[in-house]
Amino acid sequence: MTPTDKRAGSDEAFLREVDDAVRASDLTSFWTRYGRWLLVALVAGLLAFGGYIIYKNQLQAAADKQSEEFVDAMDKLRAGQQKEARAKLATLAKADQPGYRAMAQLVEANLLGEDGKTKEAVALYAKVAGDSSLPQTFRDLALIRQTSAEFDTLAPQAVVDRLKPLSTPGHAWFGSAGELTALAYIKMGKDNLAGPIFAQIAKQEGLPPSLRSRAQQMAGAMGIDTVQVDEKKNTATASADNATKGE
């Protein structure tokens, strides 16, 4: 190795040491200047995470308690203890958990209807239907119950317009909304529109048997034999399957 090579290697080692020293100095300076704030941020983050966990646990505990309160209220209703049940429902109607808040109000509206207080029941149904903080499925149910309670006093077209979004086959509330819509069409003298809706209800699986049976009878009264339609459909499907297999 020549003296020049030795000097170059020595210079490189020196520069490396200087670089390491500068980095160490920068790190020490950085930690001195910002270390305390980093620790504060870390502790704050841990506290926030811990607070979130506690908050979630409290929410779950509150939901569990509200569930027990709702079940207890229903048990009291079945036992004929309306005063105690309605007191619990009134409390649940103000609960933070939107699901139980909605259910409590719907049950109370049903009870008002049974008491003959139709206006109060309709007002409460309308309140639930218009409350955007509640789950949509409860709001839809409230709208159906409101419409049912007002059916005799509403213009048939108003019923059709109000329930149009819900009376589509496949919608969760199609059975109830479709039936009211079909009945409104009958009041309008439009049996040609009512019959197909009843037929669709009769053929839709998953709906209550009593509703499907009622719809089948109504469709039949309008000249639509849902059983025969299903048989023709099944025959056509079977023929198509056999033709496919034969190819």
Image (tube, grey):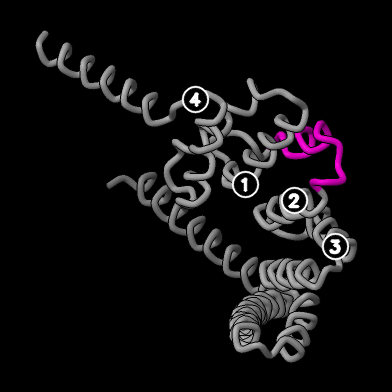
Q: Position of residue 237 (x, y in %)?
A: 27, 20
**Left or right placement of residue 192 versus residue 223 in this view:** right
Q: Position of residue 150 (x, y in %)?
A: 82, 50
Q: Quadrant of residue 67?
A: bottom right
How far apart in space, not on screen, are marks 1 and 2 (Cα)? Answer: 9 Å
Circle on res. 224? 4
Whether residues under marks 2 and 3 lie with C-beta atoms below 8 angstroms apart, the answer is no
The type of residue carrying mark 3 is Thr
| Observer able to see residue 33 | no
Q: Please tell me which residue lies in front, 83 or 97.
A: 83
The type of residue carrying mark 2 is Ser
How far apart in space, not on screen, are marks 2 and 3 (Cα)? Answer: 11 Å
Q: Position of residue 203 (x, y in %)?
A: 44, 36
Q: Which residue is mark 1?
A: 176
Q: Within 10 Å of the Cα at label 1, are there few (<14), some (14-19), or many (20+) other Cα atoms?
A: many
Secondary element at image label 1? helix
Q: Is residue 93 magenta?
A: no
Q: Earlier in the sequence, mark 4 or mark 2?
A: 2
Q: What range of the chain is rendered magenta? A: 151-165
| Observer able to see residue 148 | yes
Q: Which residue is mark 2?
A: 148
